[in-house]
Image (tube, helix red, strand yellow):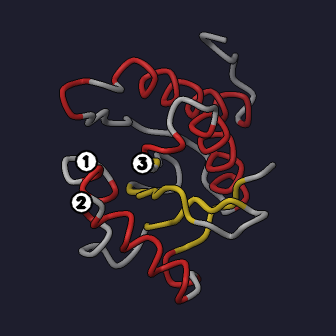
């Protein structure tokens, strides 16, 4: 897998600086979800990092209990529509399961002007299926 999930406190100084630059870029001024809480929340925040270059390309916020995780994710616009969202949710689900999470809760879709609502809903369903399969439930909607 080419992506890693890195907890905010474990980011290098360079990675944290790269994230700040992404968040300040004019192309992301109207983005919602994790970019809006990156500087506010103290826990449950992660970066999505390309393993080979160690470059951050997205953010994740996870709230809820371990039996009902409700994540939000965001990718830099450069990486959208190229399969990274699918890799992100697969990597995130594997990471959370390895951390003892056992269930997925409601995932809110917050795309500006509904521009990414359909792909975001598909990603949310894919994420939730990981937990159905992990718990031995039928993989509905595959």
- Looking at the rendered image, the quarter that the C terminus falls into is top right
The answer to which of marks 3 and 1 sits earlier in the sequence is 1
Q: Secondary structure at mark 3?
A: strand
Q: Pinpoint residue 55: horizontal percent, then vertical percent.
A: 62, 67
Q: Secondary structure at mark 1?
A: loop
Q: Which residue is mark 1?
A: 32
Q: Pinpoint residue 43: horizontal percent, then vertical percent.
A: 40, 74
Task: Indicate whether 70 appears above or below 138.
Answer: below
Q: Which residue is mark 2?
A: 36
Disc 3, disc 1: CB below 8 Å?
A: yes
Going by the image, does 58 lie left or right of 91? Answer: left
Q: Residue at x 41, y 46 (%)?
A: 70
Instruction: Classify 10 Å Cα crowding around label 3: few (below 14), some (14-19), many (20 and above).
Output: many
Q: Pinpoint residue 91: horizontal percent, then vertical percent.
A: 68, 48
Marking on residue 10: none
Marking on residue 74: 3
Going by the image, does 126 lie left or right of 44? Answer: right
Q: Residue at x 32, y 64 (%)?
A: 23
The answer to which of marks 2 and 3 sits earlier in the sequence is 2
Q: Pinpoint residue 121: horizontal percent, then vertical percent.
A: 42, 23
Occupied quadrant, residue 35: bottom left
């Amino acid at each position: 897998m080419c992506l890693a999930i890195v907890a905010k406190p474990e980011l290098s100084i360079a990675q944290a600086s790269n994230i700040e630059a992404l968040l300040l870029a004019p192309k992301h001024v109207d983005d919602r979800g994790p970019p809006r809480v990156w500087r506010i929340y103290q826990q449950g925040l992660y970066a999505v990092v390309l393993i080979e270059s160690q470059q951050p390309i997205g953010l994740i916020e996870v709230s809820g209990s371990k039996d009902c995780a409700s994540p939000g994710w965001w990718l830099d616009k450069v990486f959208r529509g190229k399969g990274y969202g699918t890799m992100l949710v697969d990597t995130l689900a594997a990471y959370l399961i390895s951390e003892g999470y056992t269930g997925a809760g409601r995932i809110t879709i917050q795309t500006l002007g509904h521009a990414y609502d359909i792909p975001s809903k598909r990603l949310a369903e894919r994420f939730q299926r990981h937990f159905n399969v992990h718990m031995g439930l039928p993989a509905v909607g595959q």
